[in-house]
Amino acid sequence: FRESLMKAATMSGASLGVLGMGMGAVGDAAMMANLGTFTLAGAAGYQVVWGVAHALHTPLMSVTNAISGTTAIGGLMLLGTGNGAVTALAGTAVGVSAVNIVGGFVVSQRMLDLFKKPGEVDYSYLTLAPGAMLVAAPFVNPALIEATGVVSSLLCIGSIGALANMKTAQSGAWMGISGVAGGLAATVAGMPASALPMAGALMAAGGAGGMVLGKQVSPIALPQTVAAFHSLVGLA
């Protein structure tokens, strides 16, 4: 009885909290939509990481950190506004986020490689196939920008879920790369042409820095490197 009562009280409290937030957003359609996205994302996140293998806690943290580098999308959307201060802040966010994205996935892959058996052949990189499709789609047909964003989001969530199991962890990392790449492509496809050179240079420079850092760090320092990369998300 006590356990069931606690579960019921927790669920009731959470429901009241969401209802309270809903009361504060009455009449604001955009806010209500964002509230729905926020609560569903929280529920999905809870479900996908529930029961993760203990050995995969750090790789899971590393991949979720790399995905959180999609703060770059906010910066990309603000580039080319014509305001110098906004452009400087947005450019900084894009650059440091690119360091986090590339470096985070490099570190994640290095962590997962530690679990490979000698001589084991891994074809999980084939999971990049949907990523290639998502990167091309919004440029081939701009009408697919929104759909690309949706599929990219689903891949990111699926990536986190796959990291909960040792058998699917390798594929999960590549799936996350596909999702982030698709999200960035959908954003870039909708940017003004004048902002593209700066966006490309910032992402390339940040990505190169993240690649170097991710490959040079010693295996013992990989978890600390994940924490350092995550601080860049806060900066962005």
Image (tube, rainbow, N blue to C red):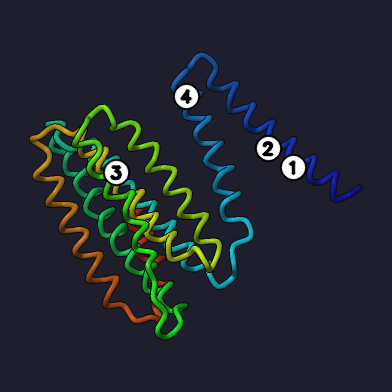
Looking at the image, residue 37 lies above or below residue 47: above
Residue situated in front as seen by the camera: 179 or 217: 179
Q: Are marks 2 and 1 in contact (CB under 8 Å)?
A: yes
Per the image, the residue denoted by label 4 is 31
Per the image, the residue denoted by label 1 is 10
Residue that protrudes farthest toward the top in the picture: 27
How crowded pointer 3 is (Cα within 10 Å; few <14, some 14-19, many 20+) is rated as: many
Q: Amino acid at mark 3?
A: Leu
Residue drawn at (26%, 48%) of the image:
93
Q: CA distance from mark 2 to mark 4?
A: 19 Å
Per the image, the residue denoted by label 2 is 14
Q: Secondary structure at mark 1?
A: helix
Of marks 4 and 3, the one in the foreground: 3
Percent x, y of residue 223: 43, 72
Q: Are marks 4 and 3 in contact (CB under 8 Å)?
A: no
Per the image, the residue denoted by label 3 is 134
Name the image quarter holding residue 199. top left
Q: Secondary structure at mark 4?
A: helix
Q: CA distance from mark 1 to mark 3?
A: 39 Å
Q: Are marks 1 and 3 in contact (CB under 8 Å)?
A: no
Residue drawn at (69%, 31%) of the image:
16
Name the image quarter holding residue 112. bottom left
Tell whether 214 sits left or right of 162: left
Residue situated in front as seen by the camera: 165 or 191: 165
Percent x, y of residue 46: 59, 49
Of marks 2 and 3, the one in the foreground: 3
Name which of mark 2 and mark 4 comes first in the sequence. Answer: 2
Looking at the image, residue 216 lies above or below residue 17: below
Residue drawn at (33%, 52%) of the image:
178
How crowded pointer 1 is (Cα within 10 Å; few <14, some 14-19, many 20+) is rated as: few
Tell whether 106 sits left or right of 13: left
